[in-house]
Image (spheres, grey):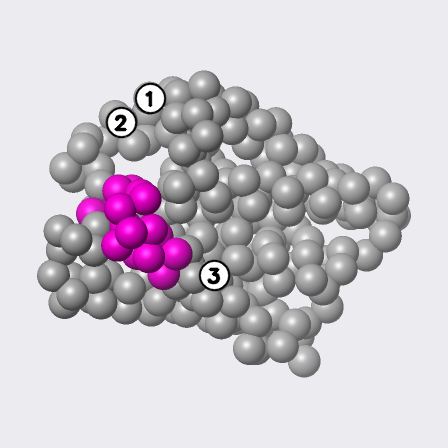
Amino acid sequence: MSPTTLKRPVVTVNLILVILEIIALIHDCMVFGPGLFKWYTVDSNLLQLAVSALVVYYCLKNEPLPDRLTRIHFISAAGLTITFLIAAFVLAPEGGIRYYFIENVAPINHLIAPALSVISLLFLEKVKKQPLHMILWPAAVSLLYGAVCLVLNALNVLEGPYFFLEVRKQPVSVIVLWFAIIAVLCLALSFAYYRIKWRKKA
């Protein structure tokens, strides 16, 4: 089987991701305007758009995927999985399944993009084994996002966008608890993805 044939599923899945992410981004820009980037979900999907575009680019040029791209894909895949879990188990029970998983581009942002991102990363993209410390990156990026939002909330520049980031309304214990939950989730997901990706490799 030729290298081009092997890369065809990778190109197909990531082209689909690029198209869907562009559709979602256009919709979100129209609905939220410049403020859309405050959402972790939007940021994770935008990062995946860049990752998928680069994956397609390197595959079409018949070049190996760079290590840094694989590491960034780990960040976007873990981030998208977090958006799915938070939407499914925290936000949807209060705001409704329809709003978070059925209406408008919600299926792309919260379900389809996370699934395709993980499938491409773990089962389709052929890359060399990465160092284990790479699993720290998704947690670090997520905590950095949270820290920036906390500062902006404290300065009254931003409200939310998630209840546990509203530093002027939530007790410190709630904020610390949610930061810990998200950090642990990121680490657990990244470690699981790492083991699945390279379970048979030295």
- Of residue 144 and residue 184, the one placed in the foreground of this image is 144
Going from the N terminus, do you reach mark 3 or mark 2 first? 2
Residue 157 is a magenta residue? yes
Residue matched to label 1: 103
Q: How many neighbours does mark 2 have within 10 angstroms: few (below 14), some (14-19), or many (20 or more)?
A: some
Relative placement, left or right, of 151 versus 176 is right
Q: Which mark's residue is nearer the viewer, 3 or 2?
A: 3
- Of residue 169 and residue 136, the one placed in the foreground of this image is 169
The reply to whether the C-beta atoms of the residues labelled 3 and 1 are less than 8 Å apart is no
Residue matched to label 3: 141
The quadrant holding residue 19 is top right
Relative placement, left or right, of 150 versus 131 is left
Q: From which residue to which does the magenta span run? A: 147-164
Disc marking residue 17: none
Residue beneath the point at 29% across and 32% down? 100
Among all residues in the image, which is located at the extreme front? 155
Q: Secondary structure at mark 3?
A: helix
Q: CA distance from mark 3 to mark 2?
A: 27 Å
Image location of residue 18, percent across then percent down: 62, 33
The quadrant holding residue 173 is bottom left
Q: Amino acid at mark 1?
A: Glu
Image location of residue 149, percent across then percent down: 35, 52
Residue matched to label 2: 99
Residue beneath the point at 86% across and 52% down? 63
Among all residues in the image, which is located at the extreme bottom? 202
Q: How many neighbours does mark 3 have within 10 angstroms: few (below 14), some (14-19), or many (20 or more)?
A: some
Residue 75 is a magenta residue? no
